[in-house]
Image (spheres, rainbow, N blue to C red):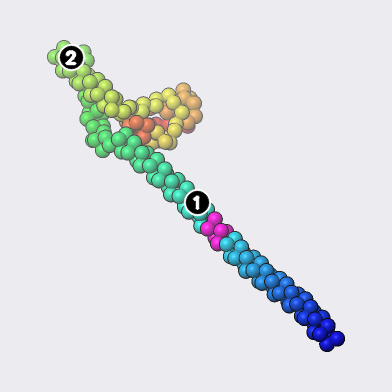
Amino acid sequence: MSNEENKVTEAELDQIIAEAEKVEEAELNEESVDEQEAKIAQLEAALLSSESKVKEQQDSVLRAKAEVENMRRRTEQEVDKARKYALNKFAEGLLPVIDNLERAVQAADAENEAVKPILEGVELTHKTFVDTVAKFGLTEINPEGEVFNPEYHQAMSIQESPDHESNTVMFVMQKGYELNGRVIRPAMVMVAK
C-alpha cells in the first residue's frame, strides 16, 4: 500500500502541479492583460494629445490664412486710396487758380469790344482747365437752391428769406470741390432760415 499511496500522492502531486501551472498561467495572462490595458490607455492618451495638437495647428493655420487675407485686402484698399487721392494736395493748389479765372470772367465788362477777345480767352482757358481737372476726378460743388448739407457745405451766414425754403442754400459765396468723392473744400454758402 505504500506504493499505492506513493502513486496516489504522485497523481495528486501531478494534479497539484497542473493546477499550479494553470494558476500561474492565469496570473501571467492577467498580468499580460493588465499590461496591455495600461499600454492601450497610454496609447489612447497619446492619441488624444496628438489630436488636440493637430486641432490647435489647424486653428493657427486658419487664423494665419485669415490674417494674410485681411492684410491683402487692407493693402489693396490703401493702394486704391493712394491712387485715388494722390492728387489731393495738387488739386488743392489748383483751386485758387480756378477761382481767379472765374472772378476774372465775372469782373470783365462783356460789352466793351476791346475786352471781349481777352474775356473769350479767359473763358476758354477756364473751360479747358476745369475739363482737364475733371478727367482726374476733381468736380465742383455748387449747391445753390439745394438743401444745406454740412458734409459738403459750410454755412457762412443764415438769413431769413420768404423766397426760399428753410435750410436751403440761397447763395454760394465760394464753390466747393471734391476729388473722387472726397470733399477737399466745402462750398461756402448762405442758408435760408
Answer whether labels 1 and 2 touch (C-beta < 8 Å).
Answer: no
Magenta span includes 49: yes
Q: Residue furthest bottom?
A: 2
Tally of numbered tags: 2
Task: Read off the residue under disc 2.
Answer: 116
Return the x and y of residue 8 as percentages of the image width and height.
82, 81
Measuring 49% from the left and 26% from the top, which residue is drawn there?
165
Taking the magenta stretch, the answer to whether it contains residue 72 is: no
Local secondary structure at mark 2: helix
Pinpoint residue 167: horizontal percent, then vertical percent.
47, 31
Q: Which residue is mark 1?
A: 59
| Kind of residue at disc 2 | Lys
* Residue depth check, mark 1 versus mark 2: number of the one nearer the observer: 1
Label 1 SS? helix
Question: Where residue 125 sits in the image (x, y, percent)?
Answer: 20, 21
Give the CA distance from mark 1 to mark 2.
76 Å
Instruction: Specify the amino acid type for callout 1.
Output: Asp
Q: Is residue 29 above or below residue 13?
A: above
Query: Within 10 angstroms of label 1, few (less than 14), some, or many (20 or more) residues?
Result: few
Residue 16 at least partly seen: no
Residue shown at 73% from the left, 77% from the top: 17
Residue 161 against residue 18 in the figure, above or below: above
